[in-house]
Amino acid sequence: MATLKQVAALADVPILTAYQALSGSAAVPQAQRQSVLAAAEQLGYTLHVTIKDVAALAGVSIATVSYALNNSAPVSAATRQRVLEAAAALNYRPNVNGRTLQANKTRLVGYGWHDVKRGSSASFLDRFTYWMAQAVESYGYHVLTFAHSEESPTDAYRELIQTNRVDGFILAHTNRNDVRIRYLMEARVPFAAFGRANDRWDFPYVDVDGRRGVELVTEHLIELGHTRIALIGWPEGSLSGDARVQGYFDALDAAALPVHSAWVRRAENSSAAAAAAAAELMALPSALRPTAIACVSDLMAIGVMNYLNSRGIRVGYDVAVSGFDDEPIAELVHPPLTTLRQPVDDLAAQVVALLMAELERIPAPQRQILVAPQLIVRASTDPKRQLP
Protein backbone atom coordinates (compact mmCIF):
# COMPACT_ATOMS: atom_id res chain seq x y z
CA MET A 1 0.00 0.00 0.00
CA ALA A 2 1.37 3.37 -1.01
CA THR A 3 2.12 6.02 1.58
CA LEU A 4 1.93 9.79 1.60
CA LYS A 5 5.73 9.85 1.68
CA GLN A 6 5.87 7.88 -1.58
CA VAL A 7 3.36 10.19 -3.22
CA ALA A 8 5.43 13.19 -2.16
CA ALA A 9 8.62 11.60 -3.46
CA LEU A 10 7.06 10.79 -6.85
CA ALA A 11 5.64 14.30 -7.14
CA ASP A 12 8.96 15.77 -5.96
CA VAL A 13 7.33 17.89 -3.24
CA PRO A 14 7.60 17.94 0.57
CA ILE A 15 5.31 15.59 2.51
CA LEU A 16 3.34 18.47 3.99
CA THR A 17 2.74 19.95 0.52
CA ALA A 18 1.46 16.58 -0.71
CA TYR A 19 -0.93 16.40 2.24
CA GLN A 20 -2.16 19.95 1.68
CA ALA A 21 -2.71 19.28 -2.01
CA LEU A 22 -4.74 16.13 -1.36
CA SER A 23 -6.68 17.42 1.64
CA GLY A 24 -7.28 20.97 0.42
CA SER A 25 -6.27 22.22 3.85
CA ALA A 26 -4.04 24.94 2.46
CA ALA A 27 -3.33 26.69 -0.84
CA VAL A 28 -0.79 24.88 -3.02
CA PRO A 29 0.62 26.15 -6.35
CA GLN A 30 -1.37 24.69 -9.25
CA ALA A 31 1.63 22.92 -10.78
CA GLN A 32 2.50 21.16 -7.53
CA ARG A 33 -1.12 20.25 -6.89
CA GLN A 34 -1.42 18.64 -10.31
CA SER A 35 1.84 16.77 -9.80
CA VAL A 36 0.63 15.40 -6.45
CA LEU A 37 -2.75 14.34 -7.85
CA ALA A 38 -1.03 12.57 -10.74
CA ALA A 39 1.36 10.77 -8.39
CA ALA A 40 -1.49 9.66 -6.15
CA GLU A 41 -3.43 8.33 -9.12
CA GLN A 42 -0.38 6.49 -10.45
CA LEU A 43 0.21 4.82 -7.06
CA GLY A 44 -3.49 4.20 -6.42
CA TYR A 45 -3.26 6.25 -3.25
CA THR A 46 -6.20 7.71 -1.34
CA LEU A 47 -5.36 10.14 1.44
CA HIS A 48 -4.91 8.23 4.66
CA VAL A 49 -2.35 9.62 7.08
CA THR A 50 -0.49 6.97 9.07
CA ILE A 51 2.11 6.96 11.81
CA LYS A 52 4.73 6.42 9.09
CA ASP A 53 3.82 9.77 7.55
CA VAL A 54 4.12 11.55 10.90
CA ALA A 55 7.51 9.94 11.45
CA ALA A 56 8.68 11.02 7.98
CA LEU A 57 7.54 14.62 8.48
CA ALA A 58 9.06 14.83 11.96
CA GLY A 59 12.28 13.15 10.83
CA VAL A 60 12.14 10.47 13.54
CA SER A 61 11.46 6.76 13.75
CA ILE A 62 7.99 5.25 13.95
CA ALA A 63 8.80 4.03 17.46
CA THR A 64 9.69 7.56 18.55
CA VAL A 65 6.33 8.83 17.29
CA SER A 66 4.57 6.12 19.25
CA TYR A 67 6.55 6.94 22.40
CA ALA A 68 5.84 10.65 22.05
CA LEU A 69 2.11 10.31 21.37
CA ASN A 70 1.46 7.61 23.98
CA ASN A 71 3.87 8.76 26.69
CA SER A 72 5.10 5.18 26.75
CA ALA A 73 8.85 5.88 26.94
CA PRO A 74 11.13 8.83 27.66
CA VAL A 75 11.41 11.27 24.74
CA SER A 76 13.17 14.62 24.85
CA ALA A 77 10.97 17.69 25.04
CA ALA A 78 12.25 18.97 21.68
CA THR A 79 11.56 15.67 19.92
CA ARG A 80 8.12 15.35 21.51
CA GLN A 81 7.25 18.85 20.35
CA ARG A 82 8.42 18.08 16.81
CA VAL A 83 6.27 14.93 16.72
CA LEU A 84 3.23 16.75 18.07
CA GLU A 85 3.63 19.53 15.50
CA ALA A 86 3.94 16.97 12.69
CA ALA A 87 0.84 15.09 13.89
CA ALA A 88 -1.10 18.35 14.08
CA ALA A 89 0.06 19.48 10.64
CA LEU A 90 -1.13 16.19 9.11
CA ASN A 91 -4.26 16.09 11.25
CA TYR A 92 -3.17 12.64 12.42
CA ARG A 93 -5.55 10.80 14.74
CA PRO A 94 -4.25 7.50 16.15
CA ASN A 95 -6.56 4.51 15.88
CA VAL A 96 -7.41 4.22 19.56
CA ASN A 97 -9.12 0.83 19.26
CA GLY A 98 -6.27 -0.65 17.30
CA ARG A 99 -3.70 0.81 19.64
CA THR A 100 -5.56 -0.52 22.66
CA LEU A 101 -5.83 -4.03 21.22
CA GLN A 102 -2.21 -4.03 20.12
CA ALA A 103 -0.96 -2.88 23.51
CA ASN A 104 -3.57 -4.94 25.38
CA LYS A 105 -4.58 -1.81 27.27
CA THR A 106 -7.93 -0.32 28.18
CA ARG A 107 -6.53 3.21 28.64
CA LEU A 108 -8.68 3.40 31.78
CA VAL A 109 -7.56 4.06 35.35
CA GLY A 110 -9.78 2.88 38.19
CA TYR A 111 -10.54 5.24 41.09
CA GLY A 112 -12.64 4.17 44.06
CA TRP A 113 -14.82 7.04 45.26
CA HIS A 114 -14.18 8.08 48.84
CA ASP A 115 -16.81 7.60 51.53
CA VAL A 116 -18.28 10.80 52.98
CA LYS A 117 -20.09 10.52 56.29
CA ARG A 118 -23.19 12.62 56.88
CA GLY A 119 -22.33 16.01 58.33
CA SER A 120 -18.70 15.85 57.22
CA SER A 121 -16.97 17.22 54.15
CA ALA A 122 -14.49 15.87 51.62
CA SER A 123 -14.02 18.97 49.48
CA PHE A 124 -10.24 18.57 49.50
CA LEU A 125 -10.56 15.05 48.09
CA ASP A 126 -13.09 16.35 45.58
CA ARG A 127 -10.49 18.83 44.38
CA PHE A 128 -7.87 16.06 44.29
CA THR A 129 -10.20 13.94 42.16
CA TYR A 130 -10.65 16.77 39.66
CA TRP A 131 -6.93 17.44 39.27
CA MET A 132 -6.18 13.73 39.18
CA ALA A 133 -8.60 13.26 36.27
CA GLN A 134 -6.99 16.18 34.45
CA ALA A 135 -3.54 14.64 34.88
CA VAL A 136 -4.71 11.18 33.79
CA GLU A 137 -6.22 12.57 30.60
CA SER A 138 -3.00 14.38 29.76
CA TYR A 139 -1.45 10.91 29.35
CA GLY A 140 -4.22 9.74 27.01
CA TYR A 141 -6.11 7.80 29.69
CA HIS A 142 -9.52 8.28 31.30
CA VAL A 143 -10.74 7.65 34.83
CA LEU A 144 -13.28 4.95 35.63
CA THR A 145 -14.83 5.78 39.00
CA PHE A 146 -16.56 3.21 41.16
CA ALA A 147 -17.86 2.79 44.69
CA HIS A 148 -16.58 0.23 47.15
CA SER A 149 -18.16 -0.84 50.42
CA GLU A 150 -16.44 -0.45 53.77
CA GLU A 151 -17.37 -4.03 54.64
CA SER A 152 -15.70 -5.56 51.55
CA PRO A 153 -13.44 -2.84 50.14
CA THR A 154 -11.52 -5.12 47.78
CA ASP A 155 -14.50 -6.70 46.00
CA ALA A 156 -14.89 -3.91 43.45
CA TYR A 157 -11.14 -3.92 42.74
CA ARG A 158 -11.17 -7.70 42.25
CA GLU A 159 -14.05 -7.53 39.77
CA LEU A 160 -12.40 -4.79 37.69
CA ILE A 161 -9.15 -6.76 37.58
CA GLN A 162 -10.80 -10.06 36.64
CA THR A 163 -12.81 -8.44 33.85
CA ASN A 164 -9.79 -6.48 32.53
CA ARG A 165 -11.69 -3.21 32.76
CA VAL A 166 -8.77 -1.03 33.83
CA ASP A 167 -5.00 -0.90 33.43
CA GLY A 168 -4.31 0.21 36.99
CA PHE A 169 -5.65 2.11 39.97
CA ILE A 170 -5.23 5.34 41.87
CA LEU A 171 -6.11 5.17 45.55
CA ALA A 172 -6.98 7.99 47.90
CA HIS A 173 -8.33 8.24 51.45
CA THR A 174 -5.88 5.55 52.51
CA ASN A 175 -5.53 4.33 56.07
CA ARG A 176 -3.25 2.31 58.30
CA ASN A 177 -2.62 -1.17 56.84
CA ASP A 178 -5.11 -0.40 54.07
CA VAL A 179 -6.51 -3.72 52.83
CA ARG A 180 -6.89 -2.33 49.30
CA ILE A 181 -3.18 -1.60 49.09
CA ARG A 182 -2.27 -5.01 50.45
CA TYR A 183 -4.60 -6.69 47.93
CA LEU A 184 -3.20 -4.78 44.94
CA MET A 185 0.38 -5.48 46.03
CA GLU A 186 -0.35 -9.20 46.28
CA ALA A 187 -2.21 -9.17 42.95
CA ARG A 188 0.75 -7.36 41.33
CA VAL A 189 -1.55 -4.81 39.73
CA PRO A 190 -0.13 -1.35 38.90
CA PHE A 191 -1.34 1.36 41.26
CA ALA A 192 -0.26 4.53 43.01
CA ALA A 193 -1.74 6.05 46.15
CA PHE A 194 -2.41 9.46 47.57
CA GLY A 195 -1.53 8.52 51.13
CA ARG A 196 0.44 5.95 53.07
CA ALA A 197 -0.42 2.67 54.79
CA ASN A 198 2.52 1.85 57.08
CA ASP A 199 6.30 2.04 57.16
CA ARG A 200 6.86 -1.51 55.90
CA TRP A 201 5.01 -1.81 52.61
CA ASP A 202 6.91 -0.76 49.49
CA PHE A 203 4.49 0.83 47.04
CA PRO A 204 4.35 4.12 45.10
CA TYR A 205 2.66 6.96 46.94
CA VAL A 206 2.53 10.72 47.38
CA ASP A 207 1.45 12.06 50.73
CA VAL A 208 1.27 15.31 52.65
CA ASP A 209 3.44 15.45 55.75
CA GLY A 210 0.62 16.24 58.12
CA ARG A 211 2.83 15.69 61.13
CA ARG A 212 5.20 18.43 60.00
CA GLY A 213 2.26 20.62 59.07
CA VAL A 214 0.68 20.64 62.53
CA GLU A 215 4.14 21.03 64.01
CA LEU A 216 4.55 24.20 61.92
CA VAL A 217 1.26 25.72 63.02
CA THR A 218 1.90 24.82 66.68
CA GLU A 219 5.32 26.46 66.44
CA HIS A 220 3.58 29.53 65.03
CA LEU A 221 1.23 29.65 68.02
CA ILE A 222 4.16 29.26 70.41
CA GLU A 223 6.00 32.13 68.70
CA LEU A 224 2.93 34.31 69.27
CA GLY A 225 3.31 33.65 73.01
CA HIS A 226 0.72 30.93 73.59
CA THR A 227 1.58 28.31 76.20
CA ARG A 228 -1.86 26.75 76.71
CA ILE A 229 -2.47 25.26 73.27
CA ALA A 230 -5.23 22.73 72.66
CA LEU A 231 -5.68 20.36 69.74
CA ILE A 232 -8.86 18.93 68.25
CA GLY A 233 -8.05 15.83 66.21
CA TRP A 234 -9.93 12.98 64.59
CA PRO A 235 -10.76 9.76 66.45
CA GLU A 236 -7.75 7.53 67.05
CA GLY A 237 -6.88 5.05 64.33
CA SER A 238 -6.73 7.44 61.38
CA LEU A 239 -3.26 7.24 59.86
CA SER A 240 -3.16 10.85 58.67
CA GLY A 241 -5.08 12.11 61.70
CA ASP A 242 -2.75 10.46 64.20
CA ALA A 243 0.26 11.86 62.35
CA ARG A 244 -1.16 15.37 62.64
CA VAL A 245 -1.73 14.91 66.36
CA GLN A 246 1.88 13.77 66.75
CA GLY A 247 3.08 16.99 65.11
CA TYR A 248 1.36 18.92 67.90
CA PHE A 249 3.26 16.93 70.54
CA ASP A 250 6.53 17.34 68.61
CA ALA A 251 6.29 21.13 68.71
CA LEU A 252 5.36 21.29 72.40
CA ASP A 253 8.15 18.88 73.32
CA ALA A 254 10.70 20.92 71.35
CA ALA A 255 9.60 24.05 73.20
CA ALA A 256 9.61 22.21 76.55
CA LEU A 257 5.99 23.23 77.12
CA PRO A 258 3.66 21.15 79.28
CA VAL A 259 0.82 19.19 77.69
CA HIS A 260 -2.34 18.69 79.69
CA SER A 261 -4.47 15.67 78.77
CA ALA A 262 -7.59 17.87 78.83
CA TRP A 263 -6.20 19.93 75.95
CA VAL A 264 -6.31 17.06 73.43
CA ARG A 265 -9.81 16.35 72.16
CA ARG A 266 -10.92 13.82 69.55
CA ALA A 267 -13.98 14.36 67.36
CA GLU A 268 -15.46 13.38 64.01
CA ASN A 269 -14.56 15.59 61.08
CA SER A 270 -17.59 17.88 61.31
CA SER A 271 -18.17 21.44 62.42
CA ALA A 272 -20.76 20.36 65.00
CA ALA A 273 -18.44 17.81 66.62
CA ALA A 274 -15.61 20.34 66.73
CA ALA A 275 -17.90 22.98 68.25
CA ALA A 276 -18.84 20.53 71.01
CA ALA A 277 -15.15 19.86 71.67
CA ALA A 278 -14.50 23.61 71.83
CA ALA A 279 -17.28 23.97 74.39
CA GLU A 280 -15.56 21.37 76.56
CA LEU A 281 -12.25 23.22 76.28
CA MET A 282 -13.79 26.55 77.19
CA ALA A 283 -15.46 24.95 80.22
CA LEU A 284 -12.08 24.09 81.76
CA PRO A 285 -10.93 26.04 84.85
CA SER A 286 -9.41 29.40 83.90
CA ALA A 287 -5.89 28.22 84.77
CA LEU A 288 -6.22 25.40 82.22
CA ARG A 289 -8.41 27.10 79.64
CA PRO A 290 -6.49 27.20 76.33
CA THR A 291 -5.69 30.44 74.56
CA ALA A 292 -5.17 28.68 71.23
CA ILE A 293 -6.86 25.74 69.51
CA ALA A 294 -5.26 23.92 66.58
CA CYS A 295 -7.59 21.78 64.45
CA VAL A 296 -6.68 19.02 62.01
CA SER A 297 -9.09 20.31 59.35
CA ASP A 298 -10.60 23.61 58.25
CA LEU A 299 -14.10 22.21 58.70
CA MET A 300 -13.40 21.57 62.38
CA ALA A 301 -11.72 24.96 62.80
CA ILE A 302 -14.79 26.72 61.41
CA GLY A 303 -16.97 24.81 63.87
CA VAL A 304 -14.72 26.01 66.70
CA MET A 305 -14.87 29.60 65.44
CA ASN A 306 -18.66 29.46 65.21
CA TYR A 307 -18.88 28.33 68.82
CA LEU A 308 -16.44 30.98 70.07
CA ASN A 309 -18.25 33.73 68.17
CA SER A 310 -21.58 32.60 69.61
CA ARG A 311 -20.16 32.95 73.14
CA GLY A 312 -18.69 36.39 72.51
CA ILE A 313 -15.13 35.07 72.57
CA ARG A 314 -13.04 37.00 70.04
CA VAL A 315 -11.22 34.71 67.63
CA GLY A 316 -7.62 35.78 67.21
CA TYR A 317 -7.68 38.06 70.26
CA ASP A 318 -9.04 35.89 73.09
CA VAL A 319 -8.46 32.50 71.50
CA ALA A 320 -6.37 31.77 68.39
CA VAL A 321 -7.74 29.11 66.00
CA SER A 322 -6.01 27.27 63.15
CA GLY A 323 -7.08 24.68 60.58
CA PHE A 324 -5.62 22.40 57.92
CA ASP A 325 -6.25 22.16 54.12
CA ASP A 326 -6.77 25.83 53.13
CA GLU A 327 -10.26 25.21 51.79
CA PRO A 328 -11.64 28.09 49.67
CA ILE A 329 -13.88 29.14 52.56
CA ALA A 330 -10.86 29.68 54.84
CA GLU A 331 -10.35 33.17 53.41
CA LEU A 332 -14.04 34.04 53.59
CA VAL A 333 -14.84 33.35 57.24
CA HIS A 334 -14.50 36.07 59.87
CA PRO A 335 -11.78 36.41 60.82
CA PRO A 336 -9.93 34.69 57.95
CA LEU A 337 -8.54 31.33 59.04
CA THR A 338 -4.88 30.48 59.58
CA THR A 339 -4.36 27.10 57.99
CA LEU A 340 -2.01 24.75 56.14
CA ARG A 341 -2.12 24.71 52.36
CA GLN A 342 -1.74 21.48 50.40
CA PRO A 343 -0.73 21.90 46.71
CA VAL A 344 -3.54 19.66 45.52
CA ASP A 345 -2.95 20.08 41.77
CA ASP A 346 0.73 19.20 42.10
CA LEU A 347 -0.03 16.30 44.45
CA ALA A 348 -2.47 14.82 41.96
CA ALA A 349 -0.03 15.22 39.07
CA GLN A 350 2.72 13.45 41.03
CA VAL A 351 0.44 10.54 41.95
CA VAL A 352 -0.55 10.10 38.30
CA ALA A 353 3.09 10.29 37.17
CA LEU A 354 3.93 7.47 39.59
CA LEU A 355 1.10 5.34 38.18
CA MET A 356 2.21 5.96 34.60
CA ALA A 357 5.72 4.87 35.51
CA GLU A 358 4.25 1.68 36.97
CA LEU A 359 2.14 1.05 33.86
CA GLU A 360 5.08 1.53 31.52
CA ARG A 361 7.50 -0.26 33.87
CA ILE A 362 9.79 2.73 33.90
CA PRO A 363 11.73 3.25 37.16
CA ALA A 364 10.52 6.43 38.84
CA PRO A 365 13.23 8.70 40.31
CA GLN A 366 11.35 8.55 43.61
CA ARG A 367 8.49 6.16 44.40
CA GLN A 368 7.55 7.51 47.83
CA ILE A 369 7.09 11.26 48.00
CA LEU A 370 6.31 13.26 51.13
CA VAL A 371 5.31 16.90 50.66
CA ALA A 372 5.30 19.45 53.50
CA PRO A 373 2.26 21.77 53.55
CA GLN A 374 2.65 25.55 53.59
CA LEU A 375 1.65 27.56 56.65
CA ILE A 376 -0.78 30.33 55.70
CA VAL A 377 -1.09 32.86 58.53
CA ARG A 378 -4.29 34.89 58.73
CA ALA A 379 -6.17 36.87 61.36
CA SER A 380 -7.63 33.90 63.26
CA THR A 381 -4.25 33.57 64.98
CA ASP A 382 -2.67 36.96 64.26
CA PRO A 383 -5.17 39.87 64.52
CA LYS A 384 -2.63 42.23 62.96
CA ARG A 385 -3.34 40.51 59.67
CA GLN A 386 -7.04 41.43 59.80
CA LEU A 387 -8.03 43.32 56.67
CA PRO A 388 -9.57 46.76 57.27
Image (spheres, rainbow, N blue to C red):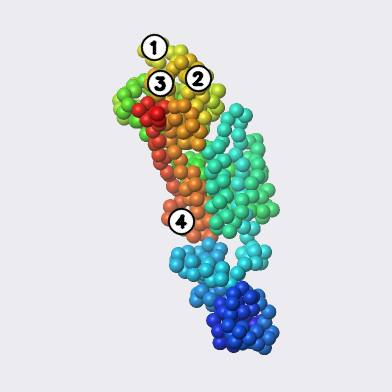
Disc 4 is placed on an element classified as loop
Disc 2 is placed on an element classified as helix
Q: Is residue 222 above or below residue 341?
A: above
Kindly identify the amino acid type of the residue bearing the numbered disc 3: Val
Kindly identify the amino acid type of the residue bearing the numbered disc 4: Ala
Crowding at label 3, few (<14), some or many (≥20) Cα neighbours within 10 Å?
Answer: many
Q: Is residue 370 above or below residue 42?
A: above
Q: Which residue is mark 4?
A: 364
Q: What's the CA distance linking mark 3 and mark 2?
A: 12 Å
Q: Which residue is mark 3?
A: 319
**Mark 2–mark 1 contact, CB under 8 Å?**
no
Mark earlier in primary sequence (4, 3):
3
Q: Which residue is mark 1?
A: 286
- Left or right for 79, reference 154: left
Kindly identify the amino acid type of the residue bearing the numbered disc 2: Tyr
Q: Which residue is mark 2?
A: 307
